[in-house]
Amino acid sequence: MEALEIVDSSLAREQKSGTVTVFTGIEYPGSWKKEFEVLLPQPGDCKLALNLSSELYDARKPVPPVNVLIASKALNRGVPVATRERHFLVIRGVEKQLEVKFVPWRSAPRSQLGGFAPLFRFPQ
């Protein structure tokens, strides 16, 4: 099955199916109990993640490594990342080809977030 988008862990908590990376499974172990297609990293994904991390470091824009790996997988497959995390918008700032389907946190009732709150928030 070819992914239409890669779902980040911030949205995987709310969905029952879709496509995620193995890194989402590490961030959100509950995803293993759902009907997700799980993508494993390829060498090209890791190389791109190293390059993106270097660019983000040089730009003084810290982003969690898992998000850089997820973005790399999406870039190499040519699919968007569906997420609630602003880190992907920061990554897009250094890699314009990254397509991000951003869903703001405030659009979902707290009960749908399963008690999850983002660790990092950027000013709006």
Image (tube, rainbow, N blue to C red):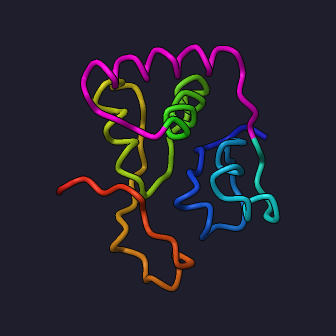
**Which residue is pictured at 72% across the width and 37% down the height?**
2
Reply above or below: 35 against 112.
above
**Which residue is pictured at 72% across the width and 42% down the height?**
22
Q: Which residues are magenta?
A: 39-64
Does 12 appear in magenta?
no
Would you say the magenta stretch is mainly helix, strand or loop? Answer: helix
**Which residue is pictured at 69% across the width and 49% down the height?**
26
Q: How many marks?
A: 0
Of residues 123 and 80, the one nearer the viewer is 123
Reply above or below: 23 against 109.
above
Does 40 appear in magenta?
yes
Of residues 120 and 21, the one nearer the viewer is 120
| Quarter holding residue 108 | bottom left
Q: Which percent across, then down, holds residue 119?
A: 41, 59
Horizontal placement of 4 versus 75: left or right? right
Horizontal placement of 48 versus 90: left or right? right
Horizontal placement of 123 versus 32: left or right? left
Q: Residue furthest left?
A: 124
**Quarter the N terminus occupies:** top right
| Quarter holding residue 59 | top left
